Amino acid sequence: MLGEYRISGRRAAEISADIERGVGEGELRPGELLPSIRELAERLEVNPNTVAAAYRTLRERGVIETAGRRGSRVRSKPATTARDAMRVEVPPGVRDVSEGNPDPALLPALAGAFAAAAGQGDREPVLYGHAPVDPGLARLARAGMDADGVPDGPVAVASGALDAVERVLAAHLSPGDAVAVEDPGWGSLLDLVPALGLRTVPVGVDDEGPLPDAVRAALAHGARALIVTDRAQNPTGAALSGARARALRSVLADHPDTLLIEDDHGHHIVDHPLHPLAGPTRSWAFVRSAAKAYGPDLRLAVLTGDTVTLDRVRGRQRLGPGWVSLIVQRAVARLWSEAAVDPAAVAAGYGRRRDGLTGALARRGIVAHGRTGMNVWVPVPDETAAVARLLHAGWAVAPGARFRTNAPPGIRVTVSGLREGDIEPLAESIALALGPAGGPERTYA
């Protein structure tokens, strides 16, 4: 237990900081058992309540977890070790299909939109006290959400989807509260929730989104919030169907105090219709990011929701960054108004590659998932071995550990970097990497 690492400190803050430092520096490994409260208190010659307070702080920060009489352990994926650290080192000559980046060839040119926005800024300088949301952007955002059936609500702007989700969670929840999240799901979100001192409750998904019975169980056991990706779910490509959305709204209607957060980062890169869930709960937020369709460097997402949630988000934002650059907002509004992206063409571009890969794998007896978006999820018996074998074969894929909590193993392939001639060789390499254990009976739900 703990090997050579010696925990030190006299106060709770010192003890928790020392343990967190050990985790961050790799001297305390994920899954490592910590001393019991009484044992560590005797070793440090402090009151057991002091150690208990330190452990409580570490649990709230997502560094350790406690399993009753089995004691406290460093989390398998502690908040101090981001899932991005689990990325594969790509040597020269290896094709990298592990990152979730859009295809640059499908992104619009930005120079004209930013020149026009900067010109407006020269004529009408933005100063302190200016309205934080560009009226043109708000009008376009609201019109798009109205067309997709998102309930009416005020509009705010955040620095990307994750920033918006963080602000909404902080507006309602306190350390120790539980949040139901998709499993497998977005790695950055699975890092964010424990980093805020919140607890993740994994909810299984299939090709149509979160499983209603799993959501019902999570909410019945005290989860105060639910986060759902409506389309192009990362990493599985799941998208809510109309029937699944109705089933989930029925579950949420039985738990009206749940905070519902919907992430529509797939806006303008998928042709699957949106089936929003908002309506049954009192507190809700719907987030729409520009990153995948217009470029990650824009760092912009629009969000709407109930008036209390949006008022809290905007109030807290005023005390931090203040606002998202109006130049960026106006540039995005211009890109939207000028239809700089053809959603049907972009969706078709990703769809051909995604469907080509899942079809090639199916012909080899391998079930893969990728209903929408730019990712394909392949369940595997041993993801570490699969990643290593594929790397040896010249392909870098993402290990499923970056996206999983309790879900079975898998690997993620981002198809945005694939060419048509890559599909069959990659499928054959995956089949060889999995061997006979990668048969069609495997699934991720």
Image (spheres, grey):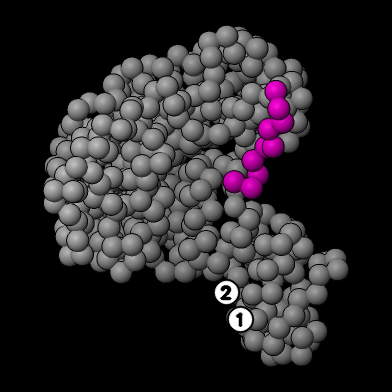
| Residue 302 in sight in this render | yes
Tell me the kind of residue under disc 2. Answer: Thr
Tell me whether circle 1 and circle 2 mark residues in contact (CB < 8 Å): yes
Q: Which residue is mark 1?
A: 13
Residue 113 at what x, y percent from top left?
25, 34
Residue 88 counted in the magenta span: yes
Residue 67 visible within the image: no
The dot on residue 57 is 2
Q: Percent position (x, y) of residue 374?
A: 46, 27
Q: Residue 30 in the image: state x and y as whole percent.
A: 71, 57
Question: Rounded to the nearest whole Å, what is the CA distance between mark 1 and mark 2?
Answer: 8 Å
Q: Main secondary structure of the magenta part?
A: loop
Query: Magenta residues, as a range?
Result: 84-93
Q: Amino acid at mark 1?
A: Ala
Image location of residue 19, percent across then percent down: 69, 71
Whether residue 367 appears in magenta in the rendering, the answer is no
